[in-house]
Image (cartoon, helix red, strand yellow):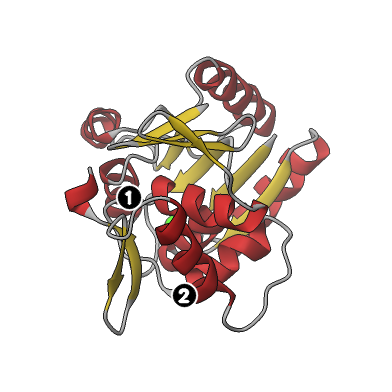
Amino acid sequence: MRTLIVEDDPTLGASTAHGLELEGFAVDWRTDGASADAALIAQKYDTIVLDLGLPGIPGESLLRSWRERSDYTPVLVLTARGFVLDRVRLLNLGADDYLVKPFDLLELGARLRALARRHGGKTEAMLEYGSLLLSRSDHVAMWKGGRVELTKREYRILDTLLRNRGRVLTRKQLEEALYGWGEEIESNAIEVHVHNLRRKLARDLIETVRGTGYRLSPHAQ
Ligand code: CA
């Protein structure tokens, strides 16, 4: 079970990460919104623990942007004592659960396991985008109902683009995503893989955004 902790307080972050590791979680700990976002692009998590008061991008904006791009990884929000209205608002924004600080680590672990279990049934075994269907359990891509043979890396780039639909990913972010899957990559690998994906699927499925990166074409939806 892999969990992303987003908490800027060094003491609380370290003790939460350590406590969950002792309970058998694989933990990544990030201290600000931008690096949390990068981690979520690169890696699939079973659950996320999100502090609201973060430097830079506030936790609430992070959560909203994840949900807007259809990332439904279960999120447990950490709130300060007494912010009742905030909690209601957060659940409305797409948080799956919350805990009030200070919290008990055993309770946090139990709640995260419960969230992952609940989410497990509807885990995104299939990703769909227009005529494209990805079966994530066996890494098969279907285009207009026909099976398309992709290499492991092509599949992973496509999976990353689908999980981040609606946003532009830089070449570096895609490279990091491949690294996140444990892949070694060459310098022009992303261009070559995108070229091959266009050839195998559709030329206009993946858009090049000049000077920025790549995204799934909104017109292909
Ligand atoms: Ca904080």
Q: Amino acid at mark 2?
A: Arg
Q: Secondary structure at mark 2?
A: helix
Q: Quadrant of the N terminus?
A: top right
**Image point 37% across, 50% down: which residue?**
52
For residue 108, above or below residue 17: above
As drawn, the label of residue 171 is 2
**Residue 82 image-quadrant placement:** top left
Q: Residues within 10 Å of mark 2 (few under 14, many from 20)?
A: some
Q: Residue 96, how many percent across, how many down?
A: 40, 27
Indicate the quadrant containing the C terminus: top left, top right, bottom left or bottom right.
Answer: top left
Could you say where residue 28 lies in the image, as x and y percent from the top left?
A: 65, 54
Type of residue at label 1?
Arg
Relative placement, left or right, of 25 versus 125 is right
Residue 33 location, x and y as percent?
Answer: 42, 62
Q: CA distance from mark 1 to mark 2?
A: 15 Å
| Residue matched to label 1 | 165
Against 55, is 66 above or below? above
Tell me which image quadrant ligand 1 sits in. Answer: bottom left
Residue at image position (39%, 66%) is: 169
